[in-house]
Structure formats: C-alpha cells, structure tokens
Image (cartoon, rainbow, N blue to C red):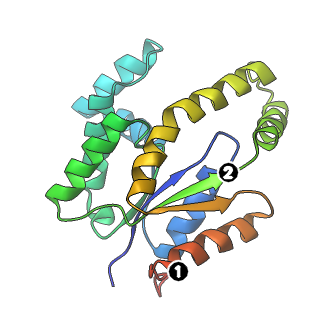
Amino acid sequence: MRAPRLLIVGPQGSGKGTQGVLVAEAYGIPAISTGDVFRSAVAAGSELGRQVQAIISAGDLVPDELTSAVVRDRLSQADAAGGFLLDGYPRNLAQVRDLDAFLEARGGELDAVIELNVPRDESIARLSQRAQEQGRTDDTEEVIANRLAIYERETAPILDVYRDRGIVDDIDGTGSLDDITDRVIAALEARGLIRSAAA
C-alpha cells in the first residue's frame, strides 16, 4: 500500500508543526513545511532560493506563484514520491488550485486534511507563553489575535474546498502530545491509511 499524501492545518499555537513531524514519522513520509522549504532553497543557493531570499530580505511575503514553484520542486524530490505531509501550504485558494494541478499531473490527489482545532483562548495562551519563554517581545496578545484572525479569514475557504471533497478530519488539538497524535492516527486509519511497518 502506498504512503499517504496529507495536509495538516491549524492556527498558530495549535501545535501543527510538532504533530506534523510526529504523524509523518508514523507514516514514514517527509514532513514538508513551507518555512523549511524556503530556508533550504535559500541555503542551496538555487535560482528559486535567490528569488525567495530577495523577497524575504525586503520583508515581503513570497507570492503564490513562487511559493507553489518552490513546493513543487520539493515534492518532486525522491523522498516525497511515495507520500508526504504538507504544513503551511496551500494557504489560499490559488495555492489549492496549483497543488491540485501538480498532483493531478502525477495521477494523485490529497488523501486527507488534518484540521487541528484549538480554542482561540488556548492558542493565545500557548503563543503568549512561548513568547515569554523565547523572549519575543513583539508577540503581544494583540499581534497574536491579529495573526489568528488572518488564519481564520484565509484558511476557512481552503477547508471548505476540502470538506466538499470529504477529506477533512477535525481533530481536537487539546490534551497531551501523545493523545493528539493518537487521535490523528486513528482518524487516518479509519480512512484506510495504515501506518508504515518501518515507522
């Protein structure tokens, strides 16, 4: 049985980066976070990397077209041929269309979208705590609330698309790390996505 193609979605402070890595390990697939992909493209000094570096250095957001090109490049690497877990992409409807076209050209589609649900109050509390621990003075409650509002506004339409396809699993993102991972794995296994024997 082939490895799954997954997307994990959740607000800042939902723990999706951590859960993404744990779930990817369970399935023996790479966890592909947009931030990591940008950093490795920049480090590799590729043409895409140089374009990304120039945009980030100017303090701008990487445009959809370039983001999609960088992610396509990463998904074309051998370790992602069997399956993958995406974190941070797609972020909007244009990126959903780009990803659909890329996967369709390879005879595939996403198998499941994991939505980590965490109450807004808890997200703010977690992020505030992280800001204190890391000494990040710019992460005020107002800044955090604004980030969450952007997430809600931009991500809701994506989830609607995937819900229409019947591939969204709503996961309670509260509790211990292990409990949350177990919930995700149980939901995926209910879809017939069985963990890799090697994991």
Camera sees residue 136: yes
Residue depicted at 50% across the width and 66% down the height: 24
Residue depicted at 42% across the width and 68% down the height: 29
Q: Quadrant of residue 183?
A: bottom right
- 120 left or right, relative to 87: right
Q: Amino acid at mark 2?
A: Gly
Q: Looking at the figure, which quarter contains the N terminus?
A: bottom left
Residue depicted at 39% across the width and 62% down the height: 84
Residue under label 1: 190
Q: Nearer the viewer, residue 95 or 196?
A: 95
Residue 45 numbered tag: none
Image position, residue 76 (x, y; %): 24, 55
Q: Measure the alpha-carbon separation of dots 1 and 2.
A: 22 Å
Q: Amino acid at mark 1?
A: Ala
Residue at the far left: name it.
105
Element assignment for label 1? helix
Residue 15 numbered tag: 2
Image position, residue 194 (x, y; %): 47, 83
Image position, residue 142 (x, y; %): 76, 19
